[in-house]
Amino acid sequence: MVALLGAALFPGTGRAQVARDLGSLETKYKADKEALTTTRDQSLAAAQKTYAAALDDAEQKYTAAGKVNEVKSIMDEKNRLAAGKLAPAAPPLLPKTLNPARSAYQRELEKATHDYATKTKLIGEEYLRALGSIEATARLNKQETLLQQIAILKHDLLGGAAPAGPIPATLNGPSAMVNANFSEKGKDDVPVGWHHVGQGSCKVVTEGGTTYLRVVSEADKPQSAIRQDFDRAPAAKEIAVSVKIRCPEMKGKGKFGIDLNQRTDTDLVAVQDPFPATTEEVKSWKQYGGVVKLDPKTTKIVFRMFLVNAIGTVDFKDLHVEFR
């Protein structure tokens, strides 16, 4: 695992560079954490498989011997093992010949859990230090939008009260998009000016006087997105995004969020996220936002809101996108 080295890893101090550093840092932290989770799960699966094989052998042996109580105890143990609810102490009727295999499984379980907790804490500490380094540079540059993003990332890492304030702090310019408030809906309740892509469904919902966009991804349709294409404003150097999102439910290792595809008339220039995509449920409305630097070659923007590689529901409202 490569350590997150804070300022040493992120030497850029320009405003755009600092924003890119933050995105790279968040991506790396999530990748490192996912790698730790995969390693832990593989270790647990291997240990479980070994103990399950011992239980299978014992069940056959005691079935052949007609030992009813022992067979029932073995079968109960197999069910608890599969559910991840093995008791610390062996059941009284579990054959003593299974004690070595059971103890070996418990040792592996304890080791994998301890290693995961220790290494997760380590990368969390390194991540926090790196966030602090970027935060210091953002304060020098007076990058309020970035500081709000960092506050959210620190909150997600450490817990506690959610940071206050909109992100970006102020977006008062004219919207770059058509029907960004989803007030006009067309066929199948898809908002006018938008195009549903992928699978699943996207539709306008009004609830308690609040209108929002709902993106749904289903078991047989695990990807759903909606997009709008528009021209770059003359002389614009960056594009700012502010939106509120909630995800009442999500199953799987997918993600949801927003991305911006910068294009020429014929080619893709860059794909960027104004803020890191989210991988966990967000039960109540939460403000997100960010700023993306525009490439000099960019003439068109493809703006997309998505839920991919998961089953669930994501809602978007109060969207505002403006050129700067």
Image (cartoon, grey):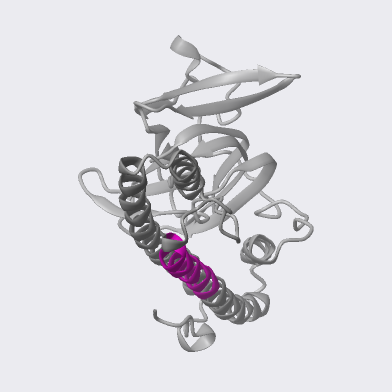
Q: Is residue 258 above or below residue 91?
A: above
Q: Dividing the image into 4 quarters, which one contains the N terminus?
A: bottom left
x then y, percent, for residue 263: 30, 48
155 displayed left or right of 223: right
State the residue lying farthest toward the left: 266
- Where residue 172 sits in the image (x, y, percent)? 68, 45
Q: Main secondary structure of the magenta part?
A: helix
- Horizontally, is 56 left or right of 274 in the view? left
In the image, 245 versus 223, the foreground residue is 223
Q: Is residue 144 magenta?
A: no
Of 299 and 98, the residue lying toward us? 98
Camera-side residue: 124 or 129?
A: 124
* Residue lying farthest to the top in this orientation: 187
Quadrant the C terminus occupies: bottom right
Residue 315 falls left or right of residue 4: right
Quadrant of the rendered image containing residue 144: bottom right
Residue 49 seen in this snapshot: yes
Q: Residue at x 51, y 20 (%)?
A: 203
Does residue 293 sit above or below 240 in this rendering?
below
Q: Which residue is drawn at 51% across and 50% down?
A: 279
Residue 113 inside the magenta-drawn segment: yes
- Name the residue rendered at 43%, 38% in the picture: 310
Which residue range is magenta in the image? 98-115
Q: Would you identify the image quadrant in which residue 87 lies?
A: bottom right
